[in-house]
Amino acid sequence: MATSRSRGLVTASATLAILVAVGSLLGGCGSQQAKPMDDEFAGSGAESSSAPESTEGSGSAGEGKPTAVSRDGLPAAPADTGNYHDGTYALTGKYGHDGADTIDVDLDLSGGQVSRVQVQGHSDSPISRGHMERFARAVPGVIQGRPLKDLKVEKVAGASWTSDAFNKALDLARLEASAERSS
């Protein structure tokens, strides 16, 4: 009887040791901030809803911070003046690991309002391409006819990271449209 009791204690001790080891290993996984998936694969089916989380695209676990660059070489003002030059602005929003996912944004301004927007996404990932395509179809209805000043999109068509990169492109468009032009 002492033998079976000893074996029971050894088995319980071994099980406890394994659970502690696994808990310790898993405790270091992931980031400090958990965020639920919010796309068609997670079953939300949301086509447009809440604002993007401030932590998305913040550089954690293979994600890159969204950025934007000019494709037309226009100078950017040091600050947004709110007084915008009419014209066409060509920008690229970048996000994902090392900016691997990009969206080309062509934006026409007239009288300080967005008169036309066209978005073309570029990604090697079929899932990302799908988000980009849905975003590109939906975003004109969200921003055309609206003032550029303080314009920011929320998650459009379920594409939060694409929306974040688009907002960076809008920030750069404001700076380019604010820049002094030689007559």
Image (cartoon, rainbow, N blue to C red):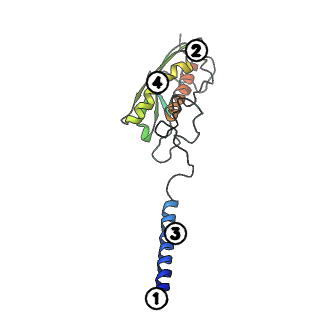
Whether residues under marks 4 and 1 lie with C-beta atoms below 8 angstroms apart, the answer is: no
SS under mark 2:
loop
Instruction: Tell me if residue 24 comes above or below residue 79 in the rendering.
Output: below
Element at badge 4? helix
Q: Disc 4 or 1, which lies upstream in sequence?
A: 1
Q: In the rendering, which numbered label is found on residue 145?
A: 2
Single out the residue that lies furthest toward the bottom.
2
How many neighbours does mark 4 have within 10 angstroms: few (below 14), some (14-19), or many (20 or more)?
many
Is 174 displayed left or right of 88 in the figure?
right
Q: Quadrant of residue 111?
A: top right
Q: Residues within 10 Å of mark 3 (few under 14, many from 20)?
A: few
Q: In the drawing, does residue 100 fall left or right of residue 1?
A: left
Residue at horizontal 42 percent and vertical 40 percent from the top: 98
Q: How far separated are the C-alphas under marks 2 and 3? A: 59 Å
Q: Amino acid at mark 1?
A: Thr
Residue 135 seen in the figure: yes
Q: Earlier in the sequence, mark 2 or mark 1?
A: 1
The x, y position of residue 63, in whole percent, is 47, 43
Q: Amino acid at mark 2?
A: Gly
Residue 1, how many percent across, how many down? 48, 89
Identify the mark nearer the N-term, 1 or 3: 1
Instruction: Check disc 3 and report the residue beneath it.
Output: 20
Residue placed at 48% from the left, 63% from the top? Answer: 25
